[in-house]
Each structure stands twice: as structure tokens, then as C-alpha cells.
């Protein structure tokens, strides 16, 4: 079997690897239908996140179950399933509190850019669909495994309510699906920060009412002008940089909520500024498994089409081009077919 391995900055290879096997009685093996490149994959790809040697890549996946361990009771061979990037048993206290991405037995999926994937804690991690979905639904179901679930968490954690004014910082796949999620939750005004025309267009298609191209302090000033000096009710930070975090916090009204779902790199918060800012902060690895049943239902019933964030499709063997296209911002998100 060939799989995707990152050796160093911009050195991605598709090469021979051992096929995964059932290692624990709670495992499942999945034949991947579609996988993809995530924006978070670009941090190590660009050398901004250290690697401990050659690293298997990929954490977004859906496909058909080929085999399960003897302790797996709910997931059956032949089912089509979608899973989270973080495994969960769905029984520990953290799972019961609604945070399966902090399950006490959590493992992070890291080998999904391959034809076959081992998924630990299969019963708690995977969600089956009623049958085998049609090919046209695969991109949207794949999106549910991470970027849609993360965008949904961003809106949920930012306390988006019907009638709210919402700011989305970041025009990658997560930010765009944060727009879609805020729209689904009833936001009245959704301001997307983006300076890229194709992404602006998709943001409006997903429900953005306003586009702000300015960044940094100029972007905050523009938001404050648009909200009569008050700020937004909810801000979704979907990037993970110091600038994006400050934009979100400084553009939020007193008593408003800021979510942060972009993996932080170099983010430092000033305690005194936060103290007087009077905003709620909540974020972290998205509890995707918590939302999967609802998101899958929305996709299967045609209520949402999050798969539109995939604007480049390639054979898995051309995964290196998928990374390059996203790195160079020639693509929002690359879909890969084994």
C-alpha cells in the first residue's frame, strides 16, 4: 500500500508503507472512499510545526468498514462511516460532558491520506450512514469529519444565536464553513473577513452578508464602524495567528463571545487587556463526534452542501500537488480519491 508521508518542509511523498491491521479489539479498518488535505496540515508542511522524523499524514476520512476487532459491537463490516480526527470512547466523563475530542483515551488520526485506515475506538468514533451514499454526497460527508464539524463548533462555542451579528476571521475551509454554520444557527448578519475574490464569493453563497478585506487594526476599525462602535455579538477565529486572534477579540462587543478553533501558533494573550475586554473565550480541538449525527443528517437531507469548499480534486497519488496548491492559495481545499 502507498501512503502519504511528510519528511520535512515541503517534502511530501506518496510511498510504499505497511498496510494497517487490527491491533486492538476496539479497532476498525476502513477502505477510504475520499480523503483530503487540511489547512492544519500546512503548518508542518511549511516547517512551522516540528516533526519527529517522517510523519504519516491525513486526519479527514470516510469510507467502508472492511474489518473490526472482536470488541466492536456497533460498527459492522460493509457500513459506510464518517469519523472524527480525534478518537473517543463516548463513555468517559469528558465525552459525557460533550468534549469527545478530549476523551481520556483519545488518539489523533494521522494516517488517513492512504487507501486503508485503522481507526481505534471504533464504536465511539465512527458514525454510519443509513446506506452507501451516492458519489455526489461524498465531499460533503467528508467535510463533516473535520472542517464542517470545526466550523460548527466555532459557531457553537461563540454562542451564535438567532438574530446575532457574527464575525468570521479566516477564509479557509473552516472559516467558510463557520459562515455556513452561523447561518444555520440563525445569525442575521455575518461578516466574513477575506481579501480573495473566489473565497468571498463562496462565503456569500454560504450566508455571509458582508465582506471585509482589511486586516489587523484596519480590519477591526472597519468592523467597529459597521457596528456603530459596539462590536459583534460573536467572533469566530479560524486561523490560529496572533493577528487573527486579536482581530476577533478587539472586534467583539462587551459581553460577546469569541471562539478559537485555528491551531494557535505564536499566540500570546495579554491578561490585563482580556480583563477589561469583557469577552467570553472558548475553543480548542473541535468535538466533531458530538456533532456528526446532526451534520450527516443535514447533508443527507440536502439542507447544506459543505463539500463546495473542495475546489480541487486529485488522485491520491498526486497528493503532493494538492499540498502545493493549498500552500500557494491556488486551492481552498484539495479532495483526494484513492
Image (spheres, rainbow, N blue to C red):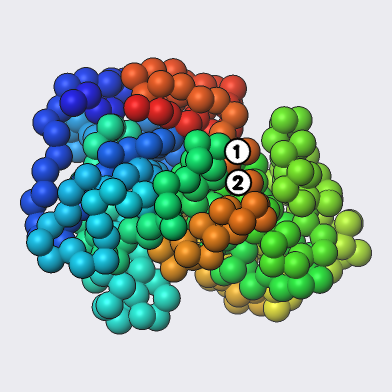
Mark 1 vs 2: CB contact within 8 A: yes
The answer to whether residue 125 is visible is yes
Which label is found at residue 309? Answer: 1
Where 32 sits versus 256, above or below?
above
Q: Quadrant of the N terminus?
A: top left
| Quarter location, residue 68 | bottom left
Which residue is at 24% across, 37% downward? 116
187 sits to left or right of 87: right
Judging depth in this view, the residue of 163 and 221 nearest the camera is: 163
Which residue is at 70% across, 78% downward? 255
Judging depth in this view, the residue of 172 and 128 nearest the camera is: 128
Judging depth in this view, the residue of 335 and 261 nearest the camera is: 335
Where 81 sits versus 112, above or below?
below
Badge 2: residue crowd in 10 Å (few <14, some 14–19, many ≥20):
many
37 sits to left or right of 326: left
Judging depth in this view, the residue of 81 and 112 nearest the camera is: 81
238 sits to left or right of 100: right
Residue 71 in the image, given as x and y percentages of width and height = 13, 66
Question: What residue is disc 2 on?
Answer: 306
The answer to whether residue 250 is visible is no
Residue 287 in the image, given as x and y percentages of width and height = 43, 64
Q: Secondary structure at mark 1?
A: helix
Residue 180 in the image, given as x and y percentages of width and height = 67, 53
Badge 1: residue crowd in 10 Å (few <14, some 14–19, many ≥20):
many
Where 134 sits versus 296, above or below?
above
Residue 150 in the image, given as x and y percentages of width and height = 51, 56
Which residue is at 57% across, 69% downward? 157
Q: Quadrant of the C terminus?
A: top left
Which residue is at 69% across, 67% downward? 185
Amino acid at each position: 500500500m502507498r501512503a502519504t508521508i511528510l519528511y520535512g518542509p515541503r517534502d511530501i511523498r506518496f510511498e510504499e508503507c505497511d498496510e494497517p491491521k487490527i491491533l486492538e479489539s476496539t479497532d476498525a479498518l476502513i477502505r477510504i472512499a475520499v480523503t483530503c488535505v487540511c489547512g492544519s496540515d500546512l503548518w508542518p508542511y511549511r516547517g512551522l510545526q516540528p516533526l519527529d522524523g517522517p510523519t504519516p499524514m491525513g486526519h479527514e476520512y470516510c469510507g467502508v468498514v472492511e474489518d473490526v476487532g472482536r470488541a466492536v459491537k456497533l460498527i459492522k463490516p460493509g457500513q459506510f462511516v464518517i469519523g472524527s480526527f480525534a478518537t473517543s470512547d463516548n463513555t468517559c466523563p469528558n465525552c459525557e460532558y460533550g468534549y469527545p475530542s478530549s476523551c481520556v483515551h483519545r488518539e489523533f488520526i494521522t494516517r488517513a491520506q492512504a487507501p486503508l485506515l485503522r481507526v481505534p475506538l471504533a464504536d465511539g468514533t465512527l458514525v454510519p450512514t443509513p446506506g452507501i451514499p451516492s458519489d455526489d454526497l461524498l465531499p460533503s460527508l467528508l467535510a463533516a469529519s473535520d472542517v464542517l464539524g470545526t466550523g460548527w463548533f466555532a459557531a457553537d462555542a461563540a454562542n451564535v444565536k438567532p438574530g446575532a451579528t457574527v464575525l468570521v476571521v479566516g477564509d479557509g475551509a473552516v472559516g467558510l464553513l463557520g459562515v455556513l454554520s452561523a447561518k444555520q444557527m440563525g445569525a442575521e448578519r455575518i461578516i466574513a473577513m477575506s481579501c480573495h475574490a473566489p473565497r468571498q464569493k463562496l462565503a456569500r453563497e454560504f450566508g455571509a452578508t458582508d465582506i471585509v478585506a482589511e486586516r489587523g487594526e484596519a480590519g477591526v476599525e472597519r468592523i467597529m464602524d459597521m457596528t456603530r462602535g459596539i462590536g459583534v455579538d460573536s467572533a469566530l477565529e479560524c486561523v490560529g495567528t496572533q493577528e487573527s486572534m486579536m482581530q476577533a477579540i478587539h472586534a467583539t462587543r462587551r459581553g460577546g463571545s469569541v471562539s478559537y478553533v485555528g491551531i494557535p501558533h505564536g499566540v500570546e494573550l495579554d491578561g490585563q487587556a482580556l480583563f477589561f475586554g469583557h469577552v467570553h473565550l472558548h475553543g480548542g480541538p473541535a468535538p466533531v463526534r458530538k456533532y456528526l449525527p446532526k451534520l450527516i443528517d443535514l447533508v443527507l437531507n440536502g439542507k447544506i452542501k459543505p463539500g463546495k469548499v473542495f475546489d480541487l480534486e486529485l488522485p491520491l497519488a498526486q497528493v503532493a500537488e494538492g499540498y502545493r496548491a493549498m500552500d500557494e492559495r491556488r486551492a481552498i481545499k484539495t479532495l483526494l480519491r484513492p
